[in-house]
Image (spheres, rainbow, N blue to C red):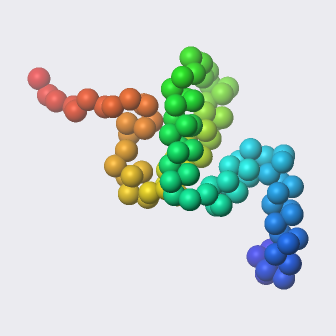
Amino acid sequence: MRDKLLKLSKEKLIDALLDLATDSDRAADMLERLVSSPAENLSRFEQKMDDLKSQSRFYDWRHTSSFAYELRYALEDLKSANPNRLKECGRSLLFMKPMRPFSMP
């Protein structure tokens, strides 16, 4: 498949990607990430985290996969902006609040 795609013109591939992006939020998100600067990707990540934090939605088992996708693509924005920052954030991103250090009594 890769070899066939390499033979296509750049314009044809761009048109196909844009067509996919109109039907797929994931594709649109990826294209936006590819053409954005690190600062723009960081801003998109922060906005997505703010949006997720402001939701008072409960995710039952039927919706956990969509929530996981939302987190995954938000983290891809962060990774595109600054790969080291993703490592620094670690688990606290998943809980969307600062983690208290674990201590033994």
Residue at x 82%, y 57% (from the top left corner): 18
Residue 72: image x %, image y %?
Answer: 56, 45
From what the image shows, is residue 29 above or below residue 100? Answer: below
Task: Place residue 7 in its image quadrant.
Answer: bottom right
Q: Nearer the viewer, residue 59 or 46?
A: 46
Q: Nearer the viewer, residue 90 or 50?
A: 50
| Residue 18 shows in the view | yes
Task: Place residue 34 in its image quadrant.
Answer: bottom right
Residue 80: image x %, image y %?
Answer: 52, 58
| Residue 72 shows in the view | no
Residue 28: image x %, image y %?
Answer: 74, 50
Q: Is residue 59 left or right of residue 28?
A: left
From what the image shows, is residue 22 above or below residue 31? Answer: above
Residue 104: image x %, image y %?
Answer: 14, 28
From what the image shows, is residue 76 above or below residue 69? Answer: below
Q: Nearer the viewer, residue 45 or 37?
A: 37
Q: Nearer the viewer, residue 70 or 68?
A: 70
Residue at x 26%, y 29% (from the top left corner): 100
Image quarter in which the C terminus is found: top left
Image quarter in which the N terminus is found: bottom right
From what the image shows, is residue 51 above or below residue 33? Answer: above
Q: How many marks?
A: 0
Residue at x 56%, y 17% (from the top left corner): 56
Q: Is residue 38 left or right of residue 87?
A: right
Q: Is residue 98 left or right of residue 54?
A: left
